[in-house]
Amino acid sequence: MAELLRHEIESYIDHNLHNPDLSLERIASSHHVSVRTVQRLFAGTGTGLTSLVRKGRLQAVRRDLADYRVTHLTIAEVAAR
């Protein structure tokens, strides 16, 4: 059960990286669990939730910077996305 919920949360994060309001509280609320439950789910993974969000956003920026379809954007515009 916990593994399934963790996977659902990771998927939710991946699909909402563009949202500047993505937070622990929003993630917990979206999954109808407490903030503490989400924290416990990720406590033993070696990667905290904040790190997971940051890593996902950095990977998206790296992917966009390498994408020829968005070469018209500045680095600041890519980062803002």
Image (cartoon, grey):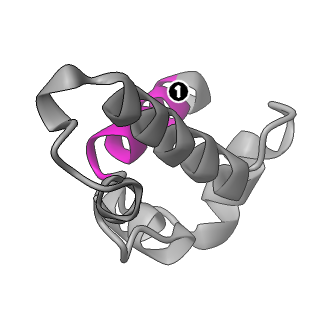
Residue 37 drawn at (x, y percent): 64, 58
Magenta region, main secondary structure: helix
Picture residue at 40% right of the left edge, 54% below the top? 75
- Above-or-below relation of 32 to 66: below
Residue 55 drawn at (x, y percent): 62, 41
Element carrying mark 1: loop
Picture residue at 66% right of the left edge, 52% below the top? 49
Residue 9 visible in the picture: no
- Above-or-below relation of 36 to 74: below
Q: Which residue is mark 1?
A: 1
Which residues, given as a range, are shown in magenta? 4-16
- The crowding category of the residue bearing disc 1, from other C-alpha atoms within 10 Å (few below 14, some 14 to 19, many at least 20), is few
Residue 13 belongs to magenta span: yes
* Image position of 62 (left or right of 37): left
Q: Quadrant of the C terminus?
A: bottom left
Residue 1 drawn at (x, y percent): 53, 27
Residue 59 visible in the picture: yes
Three-letter code, disc 1: Met
Residue 63 found in image quarter: top left
* Image position of 6 (left or right of 41): left
